[in-house]
Amino acid sequence: MEKYLEMQSKIGSLRDEANVILDKAELEERFLSKEEDKKLVDLKDEMQKIQQTRDRHVIENGLEAEIAKDYEPIKPGEDYDSPRGMSSGNDKTYRGLFHNGDKGVSLDRGGFENFEEFLQVVSTGRHDPRLREVSTRSMIEGDDSLGGFMVPEQFGAFLMDASLEKEIVRPRSKVWPMKSDTLKAPGWSGFTHTSNVYGGFSGTWLAEGGTATRQDAKIRQIKLIAKKLGIFNQASRELIADSIGYEAQLSDALTSAMAFYLDYAFFTGDGVGKPLGLLNDPALVTVAKEGSQTADTIVYNNIIKMLARLHPNAYKNAIWVANQTALPQFMTMYLPIGDVGSAVNAVKEQGGKFTLLGKELLFTEKLPVLGDKGDVLLVDLEKYVIGMRQEVVFEKSNAPGWTEDMLDYRTILRCDGQGMWQSAVTPKNGDSLSWCITLAART
């Protein structure tokens, strides 16, 4: 462990040395000199060599578990903040994740007046020293590079925060900043309460002088690995050159696309090259349809049986999410009262906001259509954890559309997500319970 800490210290010293060079040029409002640029390249190369040696040392000496002690244990089914030394999961904004919510921190613009100017410079394909300096700082402060042009921090923050406002899952989940491509945190393994709780804790009433039976609690590891999301778009050179406000429209479209594909993955992802979404989570509980239920319907008994499978720990923050094709089913759903035909609507609407049995009801196209498994969810999204990398990369290429004189753009960000529980809970008495409940197909 001593050697590992020594290498970490060396990496930190090299990073500090590189930042002194970058900060000096920024303070003097000038570009890097040739000597400074070469020095930064040498520092980056040395950092990468040490990082590779450090990673081999960790694996060869089995230090992963010891390093993971730097994180707080996560108790299944309970609220938690975030690993020690990292910002709280309550603030999902860029500043909250990467600057501990400090509004006094000045976010780097990379020398650009605004995001539109940055996009214009990338679109022209002309050499601009500001692009190299932004990418150099990003490579120095991180462990790797994705190529392309790093979006200056202030504009990356704008994209992430604007997207956040349009999403469903991320604003309601626990979000951690990822300072490397992998984030690990320990949690208890064991979700059956028939004989013990939290993977081995057992309570025994002892008679005077009695002897307790020793129990071993099992630990598992929650591991997030940054997955790469690419947002692609294409435009003609004429559109870029002549269209009024093209860059502003592009930035708005980027945030909408980011919101869509992040949400879609957090709902439906299979964990292969993308986050593990809610509908594939190992803790998902699927409630069977009613015996005589008509295809493509949702009935009141479906809803109350889903609610019955929600873990009590999830009651406070749980919401309903459904595909918009289910809206007519919900709006005509009612609870019969007595034998005279009186009824109470299960869904209430006020000012365009819906509630079902007192809990928020959201509609989205990102879930399967009415009648398919997963068309309606009852979830406590605080039991879903997301890791976000800080860097946003913007790239341009004319290769795919060379003959049509088209330009292709790609925006890349990295993240991962998964549920906190390894399975549904088997309670001491009753059916299995979870933070994530859905309805089986009705076909």
Image (cartoon, rainbow, N blue to C red):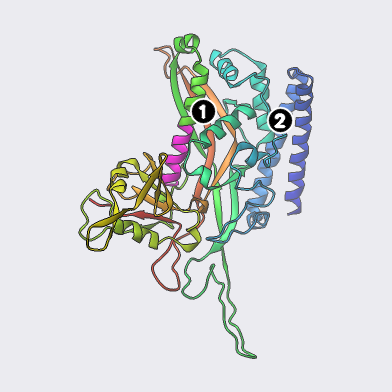
At a point 53% along the width and 24% down the height, the residue shown is 395
* Range covered by the magenta-colored residues: 257-272
SS at badge 1: strand
Mark 2: amino acid: Ser
At a point 68% along the width and 36% down the height, the residue shown is 48
Q: Is residue 117 depicted above or below 322 in this figure?
A: above
169 relative to 403 in the view: left or right: right
Judged by depth in the image, the label closer to the viewer, 1 or 2, is 2
Q: Where is residue 269 shown, x and y percent of the image?
A: 42, 44
SS at badge 2: loop
Q: Where is residue 25 shown, x and y percent of the image?
A: 77, 22
At a point 77% along the width and 41% down the height, the residue shown is 10
389 relative to 166 in the view: left or right: right
Q: Is residue 330 depicted above or below 337 in this figure?
A: above
Location of mark 2 (residue): 106
- Decide which of 405, 104 is in the foreground and name it: 104
- Decide which of 174, 134 is in the foreground and name it: 174
Mark found first going from the N terminus, 1 or 2: 2
Q: Where is residue 204 shown, x and y percent of the image?
A: 57, 81
**In what quadrant of the picture does the N terminus appear?**
bottom right
Location of mark 1 (residue): 411
Whether 55 is among the magenta residues is no
Whether 266 is among the magenta residues is yes
Quadrant of the rendered structure where residue 400 is?
top left
